Image (cartoon, helix red, strand yellow):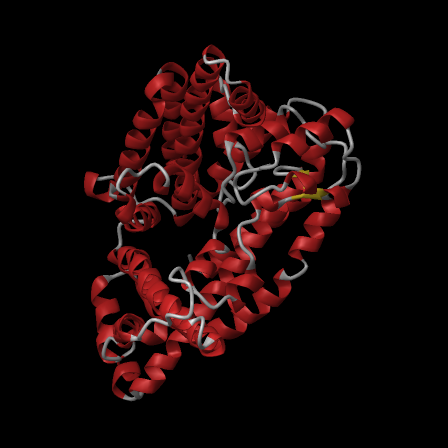
Amino acid sequence: MGIADDITYFALVVFTIVFGKVFKSYNGNQKLLGLFLGLLISLLVSGSHVYHVIVIILFNAFLITFLRRSCHIWSTTFTFTYLVFFRCSTYFGLEKSPSFTNAIMMMLTLKMVGVAFEVHDTNQRRRAIVKASEQTNKEEMTKLELESKYWDVNPTFLDVIFYGFCYIGILTGPYYKFRVWEDAIERKKYANIPTLKSAVHRVSIVPLFLILFLILSYFFPLSYVSKEEFFTERSVLFRIWYLFPLFSTFRMRLYSAFIMSEAACISAGLGAYPQQSQPKYGAGPTNLEIMENLDKEDAISEEKDLCFKTIQNVDAWLGEVTNTVRASMRVWNTTVQYWLAINVHRRFPIKPLRILVTMFVSAFWHGLYPGYYLALCSAAVAVFCEDVFIKKLKSRYPRIVFWYGLFYKHMFFSYFGAAFLLLEIGATVEYWKSIYFAGHIFIVFTFLVGYIWPRDHNCPKSE
């Protein structure tokens, strides 16, 4: 996206944040209003290319409504196939779609496949309840019935359309489940509690990120990497160092976008659950017994009692200060991470390959450029090497491991982030070659140190 796209995005997200209060207090058909605004935003940024958005929603609505038993398989197959067709549309003689349309299609892929899996899980849960009832397993049946009360979904054809087109997060997320949308829009949970103050508080840090983004992008532009003088007149150490501010620019930009998108959800009351119900990223409430008691007592009446972790997409502070790749990934694009965990990682049958397959699906979702695969699939290798190193040395040298891990994490994200930003394999390999593949060597070195280092027999083996 260029500067014009960034300004357009900024203006649209500010509108959705401000409009959230109106939407939340609207006494008419909120579903229809959300659809109208979502379609309007799609038309504004996509123009005639909006037909891609309409096709993917309508077809999924049909699959989810009329093929209940296997809708998760059909939806996944169709949606990802259509996503590939959409991105290769120029090869079929179609005009290239705007970058905003691609952003909408990415979020719709998560939402449509996600609701199909929610329906599948609902069907499985209901069969499990019947089985537990036949076996007179009261404890298991009580647990399943509570999960059914707060997690089950039964969307109609129109519900899927309303959910897909809902204006909240339509451009860049965050991803939220159908049940989360249903709780806010249909069940109107906590609709009487104002949430604008929480939204304003959430975006209060955004000006800092925007200023840092503008400064960094001015002094360390990505375009400089493609200039001949970068490779002929700059030293290897400079080219390695340049990776860090380059990826920092990318982070500041996404921090701003993610947090503003969260604020749009908060102002509309979407993703609001009681603090005591222990909501988790993407999942919603997890302590269902407390949730049920709070609902019975109608105990939630103030904004401070609510938690919006369900739609929180990033924890910028933890992302910066955690000292491992694994920990940083857990607080980055968290609702998408949840979708990948619940729909890919946990369901893939071969456990040793789960991380690699999950990262491949993430790369596939991002796009077809080789840079996505070089960056995201390498994460599985980086996490494995990091684990080997930490397991052997952390108990004896905790401070060294912390600072080494912090540098390792930033080196990994910055080095492989170059592939994510440059996208083309030629440009990426040229950069890496100019610094003698320093990032790859560093990862291999980390693994070898962890592998060769003698085990501390005074510590438990798990450490």
Along the line of sight, the residue nearer the viewer: 54 or 317: 317
Instruction: Please state if 203 lies on the left or on the right of 212 as rendered.
Output: right
One can see residue 15 in this view: no
- Residue 244, image x and y in percent? 42, 75
Q: Quadrant of residue 151?
A: top right
Q: Classify 108 as above or below 418.
A: above
Give the image quarter of residue 300: top right
Quarter of the rendering occupied by the C terminus = bottom left
Work out which residue is located at the far top of the displayed protein and give it.
134
Return the x and y of residue 399 as percentages of the image width and height.
Answer: 49, 77
User: 333 or 212, which is in the foreground?
Assistant: 333
Q: Position of residue 119 (x, y in %)?
A: 44, 23
Question: Residue 95 falls in which quadrant of the image?
Answer: top left
Q: Position of residue 456 (x, y in %)?
A: 37, 72
Q: Is residue 343 left or right of residue 151?
A: left
Quadrant into which the N terminus falls: bottom left
Is any part of residue 212 visible from this angle?
Answer: yes
Task: Report the front residue among 228 and 365.
Answer: 365
Position of 120 with respect to 259 (left or right) is left
